[in-house]
Amino acid sequence: MIREHGLLLTHRDTSDSDFYDVPTPEEVAAYDPTKGPCCTAERFRMDIRGFPKNAWNVSAAKVFAHSFQEAHAQFRDMAQREVERAWTTHLAYLKNVYQKQTSKARDIEADKQRHRRKECRTQMYYRRMGVAESCRHLRNDGLAIVKELGIDGMSSDESDHPPRNGIPVCQVRIKQWRSSKVTEILRACDALHLRMRYGGDWDASLGAWPHLRIPSLKHSTRAAALQLPSNFYSPNWLKSLNEFQRDALQPRIEGYNLEVPEQIAR
């Protein structure tokens, strides 16, 4: 009976249904029991995130008990405190349900975020490939560098940040293992892409507006790409590896010219 009445007051179909109209932490903190109940039976609100016996939930339990005994005549002779106690016990169960729901929601959002970042790296890889192929100054070493890095060698973008001058902004996570020279080549590709998109008069061509990518203070947590030419890796980062880590990395002896062509740098 307690469970069924709780479902009725919270407008939920089953114990596993989502929770609605949950009070914010600010509302719970600001609640003063001396000024009246925290909610009504018509708009019943329990603090599913907080302790079952905090001030808000003690008040909600009283609202529940009164509504329960009004709806069920056979329990009107029962002490209201017993109904409150039964509801508080049930609330502890509901709190566990809510925690599982939010944990599942976080896992789903994390999977979506990983997929978005993977998609972003894939688009970035093929965009840089296209730029390197179309630029005669990058067609040799520049194109080979992008191919060697592959999709997993591209930096991850964090969520979009407020636009700057109408241009979407993404923050780029730093790859500690990657040589700064490689990063300069990739940034040259990005600059050429923007140049081609905007044209000589800086008028955007058709399609989505290019994102402005700015360095983040956060480092990428993804492992370094394996079996790349040794000069693709940061010298200081390579020095920090022990013998076993270096053997696992398997850097190749041959390298590429990592200088940005003068025709592009200027």
Image (spheres, rainbow, N blue to C red):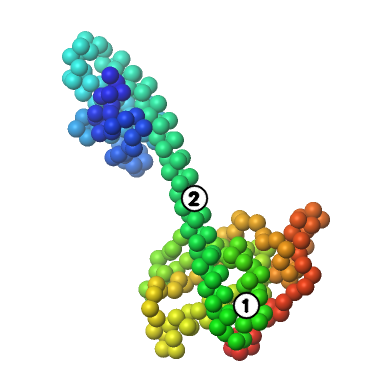
**x then y, percent, for residue 65:** 25, 21
The image's mark for residue 143 is: 1
Q: CA distance from mark 2 to mark 1?
A: 31 Å
What residue is shown with label 2?
A: 111
User: Taking 76 as reference, is 245 above or below it?
Assistant: below
The image's mark for residue 174 is: none
**x then y, percent, for residue 205:** 39, 81
Label 2 vs 1, first from the N-terminus: 2
**x then y, percent, for residue 71:** 18, 20
Neighbour tally class for label 1: few under 14, some 14-19, many 20 plus, Cα within 10 Å: many
Q: Amino acid at mark 1?
A: Leu
At 47% from the left and 66% from the top, the residue drawn is 170
Residue at far top of view = 77
Most foreground residue, 195 or 234 = 195
Q: Determine which quarter of the picture holds residue 262.
A: bottom right
Residue 111 visible (yes or no): yes
**x then y, percent, for residue 130:** 54, 77
Say what secondary structure mark 2 lies in. Answer: helix
Most foreground residue, 96 or 228 = 228
